[in-house]
Image (cartoon, grey):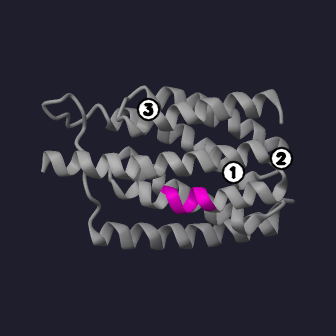
């Protein structure tokens, strides 16, 4: 466990908690967290995760901007539901992107675990996009991805990060419950 991992983990918990609470401060705090984790994963030679966190940095800025658009009477962007077509296309694109990234990482880098790293990266990007758009389904995908990340990091002995993703799983369950309840109250 490094100080970098400890600080990034604390910021990660804070960012996701703020997201569950629909507080826009989740985005700048998340930006710092993903930049620190990009550095951590570079040292660990998990290159898909480095790329993921680079894209997450851009997604943090996009999410921050999105959450300031189309505000309702409460001053928040309303939670919405992704259409079945959006879900199907998103999942299909994530699968194809993950497979392509896995092949590239296996072929052109010395990545430690190119396939699970790439697939989890692709589905994380989809979950992050849905979160930026305030689709309640982002939490369902985050639950699945976070559970898989717990095993992935635990297998490698990154226990603090595995614990962080276990906490993310619990927060995603809370987020799913709260976002769906908020959506039903405003419908």
Q: Check whether the beta carbons of the residues at disc 2 and disc 1 lie within 8 A of each other.
A: yes
Dot 1, crowdedness within 10 Å: few (<14), some or many (≥20)? many
Percent coordinates x, y for residue 35 in the rendering:
65, 33
Badge 2 crowding class, 10 Å Cα cut-off, few under 14, some 14 to 19, many 20 or more, is some
> Considering the numbered disc 2 on the image, is that residue within a helix, a strand or a loop?
helix
Residue under pointer 3:
18
Residue depicted at 60% across the width and 29% down the height: 11
Q: Is residue 79 visible?
A: no
Q: Residue at x 25, y 38 (%)?
A: 77
Residue 89: x %, y % from top left: 39, 71
Sequence order check, earlier mark of 1 and 3 = 3
The furthest residue to the right: 110
Q: Which residue is mark 2?
A: 44
Residue ID at (42%, 47%)? 174
Inspect this view and state whether residue 14 appears.
yes
Label 3 Cα crowd, 10 Å radius (few <14 / some 14-19 / many 20+): some
Image disc number at residue 49: 1
Q: In whole angstroms, how far apart are the C-alphas of marks 1 and 3?
A: 23 Å
Please state the horizontal and vertical placement of residue 108, each as a whole percent of the image: 81, 63
Tag 3–tag 2 contact (CB < 8 Å)? no
- Report the side of 20 relative to 111 (left or right): left
């Amino acid at each position: 466990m490094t100080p970098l991992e400890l600080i990034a983990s604390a910021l990660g918990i804070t960012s996701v908690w703020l997201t569950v609470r629909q507080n826009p401060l989740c985005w700048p705090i998340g930006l710092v967290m993903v930049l620190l984790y990009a550095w951590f994963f570079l040292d660990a030679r998990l290159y898909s995760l480095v790329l993921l966190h680079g894209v997450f940095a851009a997604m943090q800025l996009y999410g921050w901007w999105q959450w300031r658009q189309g505000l309702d009477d409460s001053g928040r962007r309303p939670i919405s539901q992704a259409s079945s077509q959006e879900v199907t296309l998103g999942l299909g694109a994530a699968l194809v992107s993950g497979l392509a990234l896995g092949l590239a990482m296996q072929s052109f880098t010395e990545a430690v675990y190119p396939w699970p790293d790439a697939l989890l990266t692709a589905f994380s990007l989809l979950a992050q996009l849905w979160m930026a758009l305030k689709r309640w389904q982002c939490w369902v995908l985050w639950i699945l991805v976070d559970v898989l990340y717990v095993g992935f990091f635990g297998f490698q002995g990154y226990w603090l990060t595995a614990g962080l993703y276990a906490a993310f799983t619990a927060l995603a369950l809370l987020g799913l419950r709260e976002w769906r309840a908020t959506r039903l109250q405003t419908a």
